[in-house]
Image: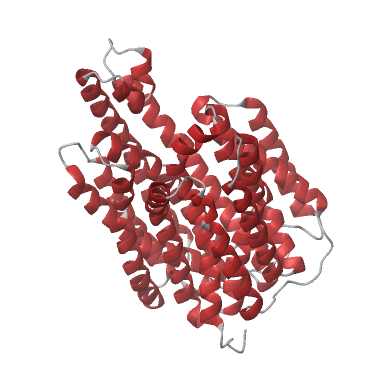
Amino acid sequence: MNTRDPRRWLILVVLCLSTLVLVIDNMVLTVAIPPMAADLGADVQDIQWILDSYILVFAALLLTAGSLSDRYGRRRAMIVGLALFGGASLVATFATEPVQLIAARAVMGLGGALIMPSTLSILITVFDDTERRKAMAAWSAVATLGLVGGPVLGGALIAWFWWGAVFLINVPIAVLAIIAAVVLMPESKGPRTKPDPLGAILSAAGMTALVWTLIELPHGLSWPSLAVAVACLAVFVIWELRTPHPMVPLTLFRNRAFSGASFSLTLVQIGNGGLLLVLTQFLQYVLGYSPTQAGLAFVPMALASLTFNTLGATLGKRIGNRFMVGGGLGVMAAGFGLLAGLSAEAGGVMTAVALFVLGAGGGLAMPAAISALMGTIPPAHAGVGSALNSTIQQMGAALGIAALGSVVSSGFTAGMPAGATEQARRSIGDALALGEPAIADAARQAFTSAMSSAFTISAGGVVAAAVLALIVMRDRSDDTPVDAAKPLAAAEV
């Protein structure tokens, strides 16, 4: 844009607030499950649906929501999303049975699908090239802060109040963000084009089936859902390449900065996906931390990320996105390598060092990767372009949780002594619940060994992401928006 909006930094605060409410909600829920399940009488299947109903709806509608925001207005989409998210959070707060909470979580997923692409798309339309990197760094830092601070906040809310407080906290944040958006934020939208209902149906069906396949992967591959996912997404790609008014401009992948950053972020998210899932168990079951202490253990990662986000935004202007992404991912890989070497004897100091290194690498790499990716998206497709970015990362995170969870689970079972009971082999929590010192020691050793394998795989994935970024991405000369109207050549598909 030619004229800078004088309220752009206040608008950034609103965008960060909107993103923060999504990130914190997902993270605080992880510590609220035990008291919530006990109060509602939820069984294992109910708990799975409470967790999965959100991600299924969110992933299924993300691309459609991004396309709608481009068509009908990004501010409008964000406000509607915040209203749905806040209202559903209020319902979830006072749920008295599992089905009510599952329904509320599904509506929250719809709200999140409208919020997430709108925040990034508004950001890239409000800030010009000279300030966009700083804005991206601030947005990324807030997202990281929510990711790390969520479990700490959740533990505090449950200790002081009750499990419903983890949902109630969303309501005032959503209301404040809505008021600020109405007062401060200009509306922006792309050109009105014909809707693509077939594309919306195919993407929703394909993404739902794919996410469900990933969710069920630790329990075995679901061939029917995988077949539906492959079929729907293959037809979706073919249709989007042929229709004159595609919902998703797949021509974006023709740009090396977009494709390189996208697939690098996917590999990184595969490694990051299982981080909290695995490490929080190590901290509590092996090192003996309380839930609140386990949350506080991630503070070094948050501090490093916040510090190096600022440094990354400054250095990125001098050395370009490609080397910032490659170098930052190299530091992240070193952090995962340190995590792979953790043991019960190493204690919390080594954990803090490893997480600090991991946060520093993420602070250097992630703003540059997102800046390179979003800088290639034409303003007309800012909403669906940012939704495409979010969808790719969500798939990477879901795959990481499923794959690394399976590695830890199978490694733990294999590492337990032959004489251990079936209950002791199920999980480290089940093994410790038996109260037998010999079994407990064996379980801690087996879990630590399995965790080491998982983080070694994560380190390898991040190294692959760094190499991919250095090879595929170009420097600033490639950060030009793609002409989404230009057909994609066969050789480029």
Q: Residue at x 51, y 68 (%)?
A: 16
Residue 370 percent across, percent down from the top left? 49, 64
Front residue (pair 248, 84)? 84
The residue furthest top is 419
Residue 250 percent across, percent down from the top left? 67, 57
Residue 186 percent across, percent down from the top left? 66, 79
Please tell me whether residue 485 is drawn above or below residue 269 in the rendered image.
Answer: below
Front residue (pair 213, 94)? 94
Is residue 235 visible in the rendered structure shown here? yes
Hey, which quadrant is residue 258 in on the image?
bottom right
Q: Residue at x 41, y 36 (%)?
A: 404
The residue furthest left is 345
Tell me if 71 is positioned left or right of 145 in this view: right
Quarter of the picture holding the N terminus: bottom right
Q: Residue at x 33, y 25 (%)?
A: 412
Tell me if 239 is positioned left or right of 319 in this view: right
